[in-house]
Image (cartoon, rainbow, N blue to C red):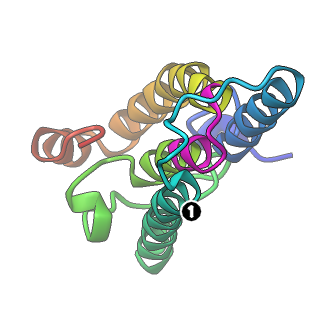
Amino acid sequence: MADTADTANVIVRPPIAWALAVLAGFALNWLMPLPFLPAALPAGWFGAMVFVVALALLAWAVATMTRAGSNVPTNLPSTTIVDTGPYRFTRNPIYLGMVLGLIGLAIAFDSLWLLMTLVPFALVIRYGVIAREEAYLERKFGDVYRRYCAQVRRWL
């Protein structure tokens, strides 16, 4: 078991929260489909494009963090404040990629349920993960992190 003394101690690992949102959306869609897009719209292709953009953002963010020598998993200590790559534009590119990925799936499968699971997912990530990460990073890195927060927005 990882030592939580030097971690953000988040309430759930973000990939698990994302997977649960996706599974819940697909299960609800299977039980009672709720399409939300016009039939004439090429939703599959558009949703797939959004999903690919989300994957690219996720991969870029993970690669940037790894290159900087910091840990990506939330249950491991952060070693540095990363302010390059996508972290120049958003403090949370991985979570933004997850949100976009969920939106892409909702569009591709024309599922209002998948889109609706975005709300609880975003709330859990914002208050159960990001808030705890921000408090942890401020305790650990102090003024360096506060300066970064002053320069880069949380989402976009």
Residue 25 is drawn in which quadrant?
Answer: top right
Name the residue nearer the viewer: 43 or 11: 43
Horizontal side of residue 27 vs 35, given as left or right: right
Name the residue nearer the viewer: 20 or 76: 20
Residue 128 is drawn in which quadrant?
Answer: top right
Horizontal side of residue 131 vs 138, given as left or right: right
**Looking at the image, which residue is at 47% across and 53% down?**
97
Which segment did they paint magenta?
103-112
71 relative to 23, above or below: below
Q: Secondary structure at mark 1?
A: loop
Residue 150 at x, y percent in the picture = 11, 39
Q: Residue furthest front?
A: 40
Q: Residue furthest bottom?
A: 67
Name the residue nearer the viewer: 103 or 126: 103
**Looking at the image, which residue is at 87% across and 46% down?**
1
Residue 124 at x, y percent in the picture = 58, 23
Tell me which secondary structure the magenta stretch mostly adopts. Answer: helix
Instruction: Check residue 57 for magenta coloring.
Output: no
**Looking at the image, which residue is at 57% across and 30% down?**
115
State how many labels appear. 1
**Looking at the image, which residue is at 10% across and 46% down?**
151
Q: Amino acid at mark 1?
A: Asn
Horizontal side of residue 54 vs 124, given as left or right: left
Q: Which residue is mark 1?
A: 71
Name the residue nearer the viewer: 78 or 47: 47
Residue 88 at x, y percent in the picture = 21, 60
In which quadrant is the C terminus drawn?
top left
